[in-house]
Image: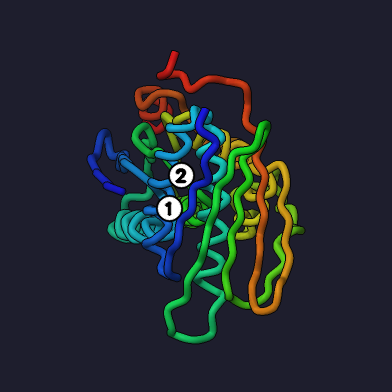
Amino acid sequence: MNEETLEISLVNDLKEIARVAEHIDEFCASQDIALEVAYAINLALDEILTNTISYGYDDDAPHRIEISVRPEVEALVVVIVDDSAAFDLSNAPTPDTGASLEERPLGGLGLFLVHQMMDSVEYRREGERNIVTLKKNKTGEQRPEDG
Amino acid sequence: MKIEEQTVDSVVIVSLDGRVDGSTAPDLEKHISDVVERGDARILLDCSKMDYIGSTGLRVMLAGAKKCQQGGGNLVLCTLRATCKSVMEVSGFLTMLDYYDTRESALAAQS
């Protein structure tokens, strides 16, 4: 297996998220990474990037966000670096997933899902930058279409 | 994401094709609102071609289900792919909303 690192650079535009997902899907396919792992990484990136792009900037200037995805022996390590407002996402509130339709509030699921789908979520602030490190264990399963 | 609509036995079947993410969920929100506002509050979301949903899509589905309920109907789901299904399961959506493995069983329960 070719243990290369995927690097994606994007601007703070929600439309970029679909392009990120394409890169992740292609990369995971080339590395024989299970579909559910690729999905989990896409979901975490969607949630984090949507938050950052929607709420993280107080000006209209373009901002760059850098993502790297590095396969390790047992896990994929995803690092997201941006210059948005400081936001520690290493703790997420737990929604009441047993609530009825009438009682269930809208929202509050994004960070919960990131924590549910990832095996670790770490945050640190370096100068003006947020650095988020996600780890997702690779399952031993083969992609079904690869037999 | 593509959205297609057809009506069977006064149930509006809304079929989703592609990604329901932060940039496409508003289209789904508008579509569900339009359906409810014209007086059709029984909606079946066919998810057989939906290959991604995140929290924004879940929020839109929840808001749509509340609207349908307030309009005297309901919003049900069918035919989720395994990856999307696990996201809905962990979020509690498969117990909060009615879910069916086939479109036929969903329609039979709705009519």
Q: Position of residue A43 (x, y in %)?
A: 53, 48
Most foreground residue, A146 or A96? A146
Residue drawn at x 34%, y 35% as measured from the top left: B49
> Are labels 2 and 1 on one chain?
yes
Quadrant containing the C terminus of chain A is top left
Identity, as a three-letter code, of the amino acid under mark 1? Val
Label 1 packing within 10 angstroms: few (<14), some (14-19), many (20+) = some
Give me the C-alpha separation between circle 2 and circle 1: 6 Å
Outermost residue, top side: A147
**For mark 1, what is the residue?**
A20
| Residue A40 in sight here | yes
The chain to which mark 2 is attached is A
Residue drawn at x 52%, y 20% as measured from the top left: A142
Tag 2 and tag 1, C-beta contact below 8 Å: yes
Any mark on residue A65, and which? none
Most foreground residue, B57 or B96? B57
The chain to which mark 1 is attached is A
Any mark on residue A24, and which? 2
Q: Is residue A106 left or right of residue A137?
A: left
Identity, as a three-letter code, of the amino acid under mark 2? Ile
Label 2 packing within 10 angstroms: few (<14), some (14-19), many (20+) = many
Q: Position of residue B103 (x, y in %)?
A: 36, 27
| Residue B74 in sight here | no
Quadrant of residue A129 in the image? bottom right
What's the image's color scheme? rainbow
Element type at mark 1: helix
Q: Position of residue B99 (x, y in %)?
A: 50, 32
Quadrant of residue B106 in the image? top left
